[in-house]
Image (spheres, rainbow, N blue to C red):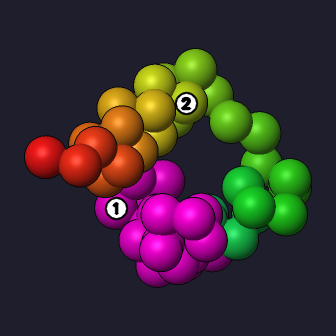
Amino acid sequence: METLGMSRKDFEPMIGGRNQVSEVFFRKQSLTIHLIRRLSERLRRFASPT
């Protein structure tokens, strides 16, 4: 996250609202396969140098 220069707020469009992001980060909510795929896809785009 820090390497990419991202903050928790950057994850809101990918995961959901502020509370949902916090729950995922603090492992109170499990990641679903759908959420993992969405994060993977968007993080690849975010990290690509194009």
Q: Secondary structure at mark 2?
A: helix
Indicate yes or no whether the magenta region holds residue 2. Answer: yes
Residue 17 visible to the viewer:
no
Q: Residue furthest left?
A: 50
Q: Which of marks 1 and 2 precedes in the sequence?
A: 1
Q: Nearer the viewer, residue 37 or 49?
A: 49
The answer to which quarter of the image holds residue 45 is: top left
Q: List x then y, in percent, for residue 9.
A: 46, 79
Identity, as a three-letter code, of the amino acid under mark 2: Ile
Give yes or no for contact between labels 2 and 1 (Cβ–Cβ under 8 Å): no
Q: Which percent across, then down, holds residue 50?
A: 13, 46
Task: Tell me the tag on residue 44.
Answer: none
Pointer 1 residue: 13
Residue at the spot of label 2: 36
Q: Is residue 33 above or below residue 44?
A: above
Could you say where residue 30 lies in the image, as x and y percent from the top left? 77, 39
Residue in view at x 86 percent, y 55 percent: 28
Residue 6: where, in percent of width, then height?
48, 72
User: Amino acid under label 1?
Assistant: Pro
Specify the segment rendered in magenta. 1-19
> Toward the viewer: 45 or 39?
45
The furthest residue to the top:
33
Classify mark 2: residues with Cα within 10 Å, few (<14), some (14-19) or many (20+): few
Q: Residue 18 magenta-drawn?
A: yes
Label 1 secondary element: helix
Residue at mark 2 to residue at mark 1: CA–CA distance: 14 Å
**Residue at the image position 28 percent from the left and 44 percent from the top:** 48
Q: What residue is at 46 percent from the left and 25 percent from the top?
A: 37
